[in-house]
């Protein structure tokens, strides 16, 4: 399943990126993968993340992991601004390849 997250940051994208890289094994454990994460070109404190999870269980484990939520907040993620949108599996990815 594909998921789009939008979120505001307080410390810019580099801080969030370092946190994500430090938690790579945890994200793998949820059977999740970041396909794209980046800040808006004109606002380093607004970001978009596109992820893929093998199942809804993995997504919910990510969403409900208190340790990871705390790490995200410490990296500047304003978690109260997070909007999670489930995307269609009928998608065009890695195109053209």
Image (cartoon, rainbow, N blue to C red):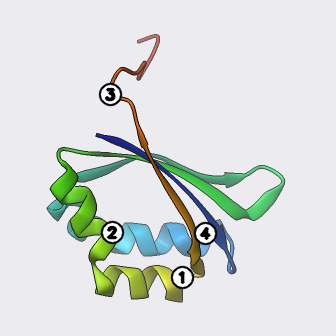
Crowding at dot 2, Cα within 10 Å, few <14 / some 14-19 / many 20+, comes out as few
* Label 3, residues with CA under 10 Å away: few <14, some 14-19, many ≥20: few
Check whether the beta carbons of the residues at disc 3 and disc 4 lie within 8 A of each other. no
Please state, as top left, top right, bottom left or bottom right, where the N terminus lies in the image. Answer: top left
Q: Position of residue 82 (x, y in %)?
A: 55, 66
At label 1, counting other C-alpha atoms closer than 10 Å, the crowd grade (few under 14, some 14-19, many 20 or more) is: many
Q: Residue 14 carries which label?
A: 4
Label 4: element kind: helix
- In the rendered view, does 97 fall on the left or right side of 31? right
Residues marked 1 and 3 touching at CB (< 8 Å) = no
Q: CA gap, disc 2 to disc 4? A: 21 Å
Q: Are marks 2 and 3 in contact (CB under 8 Å)?
A: no
> Which one is earlier in the sequence, the residue at label 1 or at label 4?
4
Kindly identify the residue that appears in the image at 25 percent across and 63 percent down.
60
Q: Give SS at disc 2.
A: helix
Q: Position of residue 35 (x, y in %)?
A: 41, 42
Depicted 4 relative to depicted 10: above or below: above
Q: Mark 3 points at which residue?
A: 89
């Amino acid at each position: 399943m594909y998921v789009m997250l939008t979120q505001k940051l307080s410390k810019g994208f580099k801080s969030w990126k370092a946190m994500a890289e430090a938690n790579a094994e945890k994200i793998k454990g949820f059977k999740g993968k970041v396909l794209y994460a980046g800040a808006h070109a004109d606002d380093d404190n607004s970001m978009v993340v596109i992820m893929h999870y093998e199942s809804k269980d993995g997504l919910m484990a990510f969403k409900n992991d208190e340790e990871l939520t705390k790490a995200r907040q410490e990296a500047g993620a304003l978690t109260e601004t997070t909007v999670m949108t489930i995307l269609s599996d009928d998608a065009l990815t890695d195109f053209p390849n």
